[in-house]
Image (cartoon, rainbow, N blue to C red):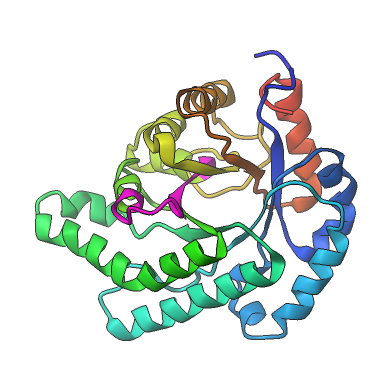
Amino acid sequence: MSNTPTLPLLGACLNVEDLPDHRDWLLEQPRDLELQDFCRTEVLDSDWRARCARAKSLLEGHKGRLGIHGPFWGFTIASKDPEIRAVVRRRLDQGLDACAELGATMMVVHSPYTTWGYNNLGHDQAARQQVLDLSHDTMGAAVRRAESLGVVLVIENIEDKDPMERVLLARSFASAHVRVSVDTGHANYAHGSTGAPPVDHYITAAGDLLDHIHLQDTDGYGDRHWVPGEGNIPWPAVFRAIAGVMAAHGTTPRLKLELKENARIREGAAFLTAAGLAR
């Protein structure tokens, strides 16, 4: 691929405290941004509005799309325990509160699918349907509120071994405000450690529902969040798949570098830019 303006534009996942260091890069082009502060319970249960005000001040002039990583620690959206589902509904609502305050248009939600589930749901169709039913029970109100706020909920692969499971889950909501996220590192972990398909297959499987991508490199063993080029992800294949989905469906998914070391965001962007894959 040549480095032309038609290449996908890179954005980043950052905390509010990181914004001063990356403000110029975020504003030089309309780069998409995902604020990750609001996935943490200690933020949601504190004065998070002050954090939003700080973010909006630092992002004055930002033209890219703004999103957040929603809460996920300690739960699944398909819990069988009704009391846990009630807690999850409240956490999702808190995340949407932050979206409303920030003017964010996207929130990441974690997939309920696991390696254990892959090996067991196949012989129990009732259990597979139960995952859908429980997810709808948990997220139904959040989906309706997201629609009213203009927020898209994107379901991110975590342990997912079958790239299609959460695509079908997202489609089952029959809402333009529930779509799919692909985390390249999670997909590469599943490929290397559980025998899942390679990363580009996750991109292609998402098809017209692909709305968001976390870009991070791994060794296929753990969730490393390394700078692209430090692991073994075949980035040309990944970006060919992204280009194929964009061309086939006329979509522009948000591409965010999600790294362990936020100070190295521009290093990761420079690697992908130098490779002629993105800008």
Q: Is residue 219 above or below residue 146?
A: above
Counting from the top left corner in percent of width and height, residue 214 is at 58, 45
| Residue 18 falls left or right of residue 76 | right
- Look at the image and say whether residue 175 sits in the magenta stretch: yes
Q: Residue at (42%, 36%) from the top-left corner?
A: 208
| Residue 64 falls left or right of residue 169 | right
Q: Nearer the viewer, residue 146 or 43?
A: 146
Q: Is residue 52 visible?
A: yes
- Residue 47, quarter of the rendered image: bottom right
- Residue 7, quarter of the rendered image: top right
Looking at the rendering, in which quadrant would you find the C terminus? top right
Q: Is residue 268 above or below residue 136?
A: above
Looking at the rendering, in which quadrant would you find the N terminus? top right
Q: Is residue 2 above or below residue 71?
A: above
Counting from the top left corner in percent of width and height, residue 162 is at 30, 42
| Residue 112 falls left or right of residue 30 | left
Q: Nearer the viewer, residue 172 or 39?
A: 172
Q: Residue at (42%, 65%) from the top-left corner?
A: 143
Counting from the top left corner in percent of width and height, residue 209 is at 43, 41
Counting from the top left corner in percent of width and height, residue 269 is at 75, 35
Q: Residue at (70%, 79%) from the top-left corner?
A: 48
What span is colored magenta in the figure?
170-185
Q: Nearer the viewer, residue 27 or 231?
A: 27
- Residue 113, quarter of the rendered image: bottom left
- Look at the image and say whether residue 128 sits in the magenta stretch: no
Q: Is residue 198 above or below residue 157?
A: above
| Residue 221 falls left or right of residue 122 | right
| Count of labels in the image | 0
Q: Residue furthest front?
A: 148
